[in-house]
């Protein structure tokens, strides 16, 4: 009986591993192709650049006629080798798969995608939008587009320099190089594209839904909590607090609601206790019953 159980449990584990891989690799593939299409349609035809190692590969393409896929691969090889020694192996492998798919998609999609006639400003905006969506999906899947992302993570691990600072300095280098060889307007449009890409990437990572975390301090905490649960259908959590001035112990209400529910929540709190203290802060992502699980 035990032998049969062992034999049946192993295929289940294998299927779970395969399903986990598929759930990651499918969006990574789609996103990598999307980034490649953005380069072919909105970046290269208009002579724009991008951030990270891809920006340096684009400079190599424009100045030395080095094929973009080859340039990206050459620049990423030492990064991935070093990343395997310093970072999580799964993260590096998924990132490598994404990078390989993108470099393969660049020449494969080029003959089939139409190049629209756009103002260069619109090209910069939409290259940032499309590239940001692709990059955000890849990051959300626990991988990266390679290049500067991996370098930044290694630098943070070794010298505790923030990821944001690493990306900023890397992009400054790309912009400074571009100023040496290209017109000023190319550098400026590239900055616009980088900014848009960063904002869109953040939004994709955080998700399209916007939630608020609310903290309520009131002498009527029990009644307020009951009405929130009854009228909004949202759960609440009581946290133990103590007034810094009075030293009195108080229960603090914490709950998470969406933007639409904020006015109703305020109405509940102020209706029960007009003297209640309440502060609301943004919440990037919420997981759990009533949000990502059925209520």
Image (spheres, grey):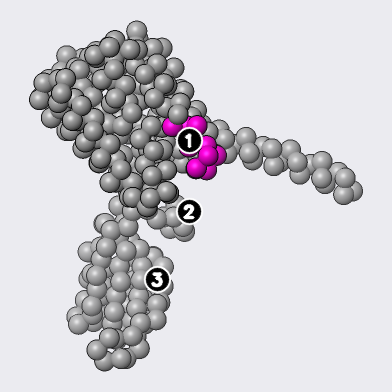
Q: Is residue 83 magenta?
A: yes
Q: Residues within 10 Å of mark 3 (few under 14, many from 20)?
A: some
> N-terminal of the two: label 1 or label 2?
1
Please identify the residue farthest to the right as the structure is shown.
1
Occupied quadrant, residue 243: bottom left
Give SS at disc 2: loop
* Residue 117: % across, % down: 17, 14
Please identify the residue farthest to the top as the structure is shown.
111
Q: Between residues 286 and 164, which one lies in front from this camera angle?
A: 164
* Residue 200: % across, % down: 27, 39
| Residue carrying label 2 | 293
Q: Residues within 10 Å of mark 1 (few under 14, many from 20)?
A: some
Residue 195 visible in the shown view: yes
Q: How many marks do you count on the picture?
A: 3
Q: Between residues 256 and 18, which one lies in front from this camera angle?
A: 18
Which residue is rendered at x = 33% and y = 46% of the image?
163
Left or right of 77: which side holds 285?
left
Q: How far apart in space, not on screen, are marks 2 and 3 (Cα)? A: 16 Å
Q: Between residues 199 and 238, which one lies in front from this camera angle?
A: 199
Which residue is rendered at x = 35% and y = 82% of the image?
241
| Numbered circle sitting on residue 236 | 3
* Residue 207: % across, % down: 35, 46
| Residue carrying label 1 | 82
Q: Is residue 294 magenta?
A: no
> N-terminal of the two: label 2 or label 3?
3
Which residue is rendered at x = 32% and y = 21% of the image?
57
Which residue is rendered at x = 50% and y = 39% of the image?
91
Q: Nearer the viewer, mark 1 or mark 3?
A: 1
* Residue 110: % across, % down: 34, 11
Numbered range of the magenta stretch: 79-90
> N-terminal of the two: label 1 or label 3?
1
């Amino acid at each position: 009986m035990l032998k049969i159980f062992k034999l049946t449990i192993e295929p289940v584990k294998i299927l779970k591993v395969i399903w986990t891989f598929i759930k990651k690799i499918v969006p990574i593939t789609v996103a990598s192709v999307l980034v490649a299409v953005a380069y072919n349609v909105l970046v290269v035809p208009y002579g724009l650049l991008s951030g990270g190692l891809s920006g340096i590969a684009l400079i190599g393409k424009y100045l030395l006629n080095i094929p973009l896929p080859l340039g990206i691969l050459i620049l990423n090889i030492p990064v991935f080798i070093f990343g395997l020694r310093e970072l999580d192996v799964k993260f590096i492998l998924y990132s490598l798969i994404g990078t390989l798919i993108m470099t393969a998609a660049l020449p494969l999609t080029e003959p089939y995608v139409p190049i629209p006639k756009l103002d260069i400003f619109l090209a910069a905006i939409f290259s940032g939008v499309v590239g940001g969506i692709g990059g955000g999906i890849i990051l959300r899947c626990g991988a990266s587009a390679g290049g500067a992302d991996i370098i930044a993570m290694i630098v943070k691990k070794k010298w505790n320099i923030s990821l944001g600072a690493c990306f900023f300095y890397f992009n400054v280098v790309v912009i400074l190089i571009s100023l040496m060889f290209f017109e000023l307007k190319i550098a400026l449009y590239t900055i616009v594209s980088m900014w848009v890409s960063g904002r869109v990437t953040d939004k994709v990572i955080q998700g399209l839904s916007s939630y608020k975390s609310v903290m309520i301090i009131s002498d009527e905490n029990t009644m307020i909590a009951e009405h929130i649960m009854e009228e909004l259908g949202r759960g609440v959590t009581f946290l133990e607090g103590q007034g810094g001035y009075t030293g009195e112990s108080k229960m603090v209400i914490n709950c998470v609601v969406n933007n639409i529910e904020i006015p109703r929540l305020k109405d509940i709190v102020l209706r029960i206790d007009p003297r209640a203290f309440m502060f609301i802060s943004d919440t990037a992502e919420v997981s759990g019953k009533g949000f990502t699980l059925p209520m």
